[in-house]
Amino acid sequence: MKKYTFKGGTHVKEYKDTSDCKIEVMPAPQIVSIPLSQHIGAMCDAVVKVGDEVCMGQVIGEAPGKLASPVHSSVSGKVKKIIAVNNAQGNAIKTVVIENDFKDTLFSTIKPYGKPIKGLDANEVIDMVYAAGISGMGGATFPTYAKIKSAIGKVDTLVINCAECEPFITADHRLMLEYPEKIIGGAEILLKTFNLPYGYIAIEDNKKDAVEVLTKTIADSNVLKVCVCKTKYPQGDERQIIYALTGKELPAGKLPADIGCVVFNAETCAAIYDAYTTGIPLIQRVLTVAGNCITTPKNLLVRIGTPFSALIEYCGGASAPIYSLISGGPMMGKACWDIDGPVTKGTSAVLAFTKDFRKRYEQPKSCIHCGLCVRNCPMHLMPNYLAQYSQSRNFDETKNFDIMSCVECGTCSYNCPAKIPIVQYIRVAKDVLRTKQKKQ
């Protein structure tokens, strides 16, 4: 069997200990805190006020005419307050705090789409996906309706990204094993939307059971093909997965649609299928709770707005003092300063670690010019120079080394024998350049 792969990348220790943990439905908490910005683009405006009674699935935030995804209540209950809360990046995000009445009263207009997939047209799918508030659930959080809209008429290749290459995370893996029909159903809706004859489902070869399940599920279908990819990080990055499957390289500053491709995450496909079959918007998601601090690591189906502390408590609590709390994977996730921070549409995992588990960057040593960061960079950049220019605050020079093409996968930092936090230096430089561009 051919195994698809890409140039560069690295092999990381997987820690996929939760791959055998079936998805558990976690009861909704008493209080949910739902940020009005869970996507790339404009922050939504609250369309409810303090004291309002809301239903599950009711719109509580939207930004008509802007690049944004509507935000819905994940429970029924009363709006207790609307406040600004700092997210992991230190940005103040308006947040709607709702007290759960535990009735799960569904909003009155929610119902299945009620039309065969073969009868759907592109505009209907765009409207349905927008109304459901779906944004990329692999971590990028780009509004899905906008991705679909911008790719129509341009693409000849649809890829469903089931790679899940980050260590610890097994949420997509369990989704493939337990709900393959949702992923396939979402893919079929997208194929109809783009008027494509077939599409690809890309899975790493460390998930042989998922390969078998999906291959068996689509046995009678001639529109989807399961492609087994070599297990290597960051195989799940859309640039790498496109190259692995098609041989096409995505130029800097271009979107996949510009080279005829469009990529959707497995759980995003499932959310599209759920919106089509039930009418229920994106108010919950599957995520992994793991790390060496967690007593009983699990895969959970969780309501949006659930505090991280409730997840940890549901998993038996912390078995040791938590030194580091990560939203997402350990390679590309974000460090969280607040253990009561909420689950959002882009939260694929919550990981808790002790002080001695991860590398500590106290006083980075000097670069020894070993070239490991250059050799392993999947974007074929020179991370050593990017880090050095950032360190010396010569940010403009980093543009000459194509810094904006860096996907911040962390491969360079992971392989650096001097334990230099290369990605952190690159992120600082990119933020400085973006701020300067906005001012100009």
Image: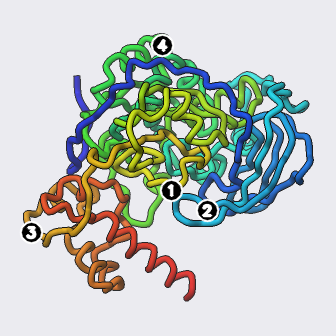
Query: Does label 3 or label 1 sit earlier along the sequence?
Result: 1
Q: Nearer the viewer, residue 253 or 333?
A: 333
Mark 4 vs mark 3, foreground winner is: 3
Could you tell me which residue is drawn at 65 percent across and 65 percent down?
92
Left-right relation of 297 to 106: left
Q: Amino acid at mark 2?
A: Asn
**Cα–Cα span, label 2 and label 3:** 39 Å
Element at label 4:
helix
Element at label 3:
loop
Query: Does label 4 or label 1 sit earlier along the sequence?
Result: 4
**Cα–Cα span, label 4 and label 3:** 49 Å
Count all numbered tags in the image, as a single digit: 4
Mark 4 vs mark 1, foreground winner is: 1
Q: Amino acid at mark 3?
A: His
Q: Which residue is mark 2?
A: 86
Q: Position of residue 66 (x, y in %)?
A: 73, 62
Q: Which residue is mark 3?
A: 369
Query: Does label 4 or label 2 sit earlier along the sequence?
Result: 2
Q: Is residue 93 above or below residue 247?
A: below
**Cα–Cα span, label 4 and label 2:** 43 Å
**Cα–Cα span, label 1 and label 2:** 9 Å
Q: Nearer the viewer, residue 202 or 349?
A: 349
Q: Amino acid at mark 4?
A: Thr
**Cα–Cα span, label 4 and label 1:** 42 Å
Query: Does label 1 or label 2 sit earlier along the sequence?
Result: 2
